[in-house]
Amino acid sequence: MTLTPATEPAYAGHTPRPGERLPHQLLAALAQHRMATTSQLHALLRPDATRQSISAPLNKLRRHHLVDYTVLPQSNRTRAWYLTSEGARLARDFPEMRGRPPYPVTSATAASLKTPHTLTVVRAHLAFATDARRRGDEHGHLDWTPEVAHPLSDGEKVITDAVLHYTLIRGEQRTKLRAFIEVDRATMGSERLATKLIEYARLWAYEPQAPGRQRARQPAGAAWLRWYPVFPRVLFVLTGASRYVLQHRISDLQAMAAQHPLVAALARDVPLGAAVLEDLEAHGPSADVWTPLAGGEDQCPWYAL
């Protein structure tokens, strides 16, 4: 099976332009994010319009059997929307969807199983998108690609919860940033979470070997250079537990960065950080809410790690 990590985003903007067709954007956003609530789609695509401007075209797409929804439990009948099989087939041919990982959610059963994690990942994206809009940076609804797989040796792969593309704008200066995003809902043990850093360190160090005579002709190089000019920073977004528990999980990530030789080497070359999702939503990712994992106690913006 061919694994296709994220390519450069097809659209990089603050929000979709009002003149663009909203039904197309809704299908593309659901193809990209797998699932999203009405409120999330509203905040992502039309933050300055009425909620009805999103719900009406969603219901029309549902009547055409292109999207469907599942009702979230204990949520005052909040709807989480996803593409049907027909909608997924249609969106697959959109130009902006070419090269995207094909992991659609196309049934109520699959939606119910994936809802908690998928919607939490969308929450993390909304924190970055809202902050970018406020700051005047470039980060659009397609500049966040969930579930991107990167191959390692022996058929292994590293799957990141999302790859973030972001353009930081300071006057005339434009800085393109990328990040691997890991969203942790405190559903796994703290040690298992920390081992995610080993996976990224292995990806950072992995250099595939060409077979036979090609080996002498092929220049050595890390596999990730096929997709990124520099290795993306690694950001952990934590939620789902008390502050006390989340702080201990961040401390365990710091310990892994200090004690594991390969992770320590990664940390010297690549910015690593962790933050609490609720802080991102309250203050924005550009606030001093990120704890560096490579030492130091002072919190900072994600781009300053």
Image (spheres, rainbow, N blue to C red):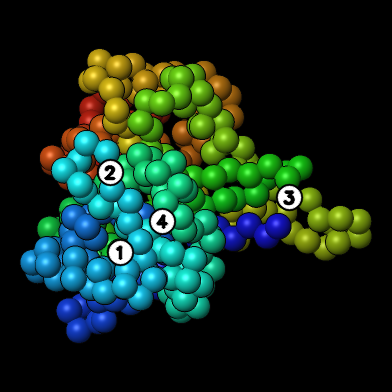
The amino acid pointed to by label 1 is His
Give the mark, 4 or 2, whose residue is nearer the N terminus.
4
Q: Secondary structure at mark 2?
A: loop
Indicate left or right for 18 with 69 as reference: left
The amino acid pointed to by label 3 is Pro
Q: Nearer the viewer, mark 3 or mark 2?
A: 2
**In the rendered image, which residue does mark 2 sit on?**
72
> How far across and down, in percent of the image, does residue 217 sit?
83, 63
Check whether the beta carbons of the residues at disc 4 and disc 2 lie within 8 A of each other: no
**In the rendered image, which residue does mark 4 sit on?**
34
Residue 141 disc label = 1
Query: Quick one: label 3, few (<14), some, or many (20+) residues within 10 Å?
Result: some
Residue 234 visible in this rendered orientation of the protein:
no
Query: Quick one: label 4, few (<14), some, or many (20+) residues within 10 Å?
Result: many
The amino acid pointed to by label 2 is Leu
The amino acid pointed to by label 4 is Arg
Residue placed at 20% from the left, 41% from the top?
75
Give the mark, 2 or 1, whose residue is nearer the N terminus.
2
- 302, above or below 247, in the image: below
Residue at far right of view: 213
Quadrant of the rendered image containing residue 190 = top left
Quadrant of the rendered image containing residue 226 = bottom right
| Gap between marks 3 and 2 measured at Cα | 44 Å
Check whether the beta carbons of the residues at disc 4 and disc 3 lie within 8 A of each other: no
Q: Secondary structure at mark 1?
A: loop
